[in-house]
Amino acid sequence: MVAVKKPAFGGVRTGGRSALVVENVLHTTVQLLGEIGYGALRIEEVAERSGVNKTTIYRRWPTKVQLVTAAIQAHKLHEPPRDTGDLVNDLTEMYVGSLCHSDLPLVRGLQRMMLLEQQDNELAVIRAELRERVLAIRLPRLQLAVRRGELPRGTDVLLLLEMIGGALYSRLLSYREAPTPDLIGHIVRTIIEGARVRSAKSPKRTKPKTSRRATSA
């Protein structure tokens, strides 16, 4: 059975009232981001819900982009996949940890932000930073799988991640209920095994025959 890991909010508390204020503001920001998305988020509402004067927030984060970026960076959304030698199980465990926890509204909010608010130029920096952060966590396990033969040589591991993520997150946005661990495992297994079968059945390339005239030309 795949264990469900609950992500932790951390990386900001260093002691004292100031650190508690920072943690409270950033935590409130990610909650609102999950509830209403980036476009509707207002610093005044963050201040009201967190019980902090808005001037305190503006002093630390002069713009909404800076506040949201700091909140996402401080919130541990993803854990790297383990390496047990079983790629399907490792990836399944990772995605279960991302999709089957109490912060599911935030995950949905981030996905809506990535998909539905692409016209907002302010979000370009946040989307790029979030994408790079996620890839830095997830890609190394698949690259290792290619190096040691769990996946065929030449496998487009970035495409594999996009296929798995696309299937899982589109379902997350289309249904009220989160994908179950069994469904997540089935999707991961189908895509990974499909990559293996496709590679095994790909016809071997043969060198075209070259005529003597062409050779001597």
Image (spheres, helix red, strand yellow):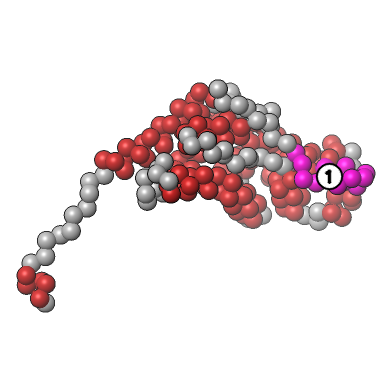
* Residue 196 falls in image quadrant: top left
Q: Which region shows up in magenta?
A: 9-23
Question: Quarter of the image containing the C terminus?
Answer: bottom left
For numbered disc 1, what is the local secondary structure?
A: loop
Identified by mark 1, the residue type is Arg
Q: Residue at x 57, y 35 (%)?
A: 94
Considering depth in this image, is 167 or 18 the residue closer to the camera? 18
Residue 2 among those drawn in magenta? no
Give coordinates of residue 96: x percent, y percent. Answer: 57, 30
Local crowd size for mark 1, using a 10 Å CA cut-off: few (<14), some (14–19), many (≥20): some
Q: Residue at x 74, y 50 (%)?
A: 70
Give coordinates of residue 141: x percent, y percent. Answer: 52, 44
State left or right for residue 197 relative to residue 123: left
Considering depth in this image, is 121 or 144 the residue closer to the camera? 144
Residue at the bottom extreme of this rendering: 217
State left or right for residue 48 relative to residue 165: right
* Residue 75 falls in image quadrant: top right
Question: Quarter of the image containing the N terminus?
Answer: top right
Does 198 sit above or below residue 103? below
Q: Residue at x 47, y 48 (%)?
A: 143
- Asked whether residue 100 appears in the rendered view, the answer is yes
Give coordinates of residue 148: x percent, y percent. Answer: 43, 46
Q: Which residue is mark 1?
A: 13
Does 89 sit above or below residue 210? above
Q: Residue at x 84, y 40 (%)?
A: 24
Residue 15 among those drawn in magenta? yes
Considering depth in this image, is 199 or 164 the residue closer to the camera? 199
Give coordinates of residue 151: x percent, y percent. Answer: 40, 43
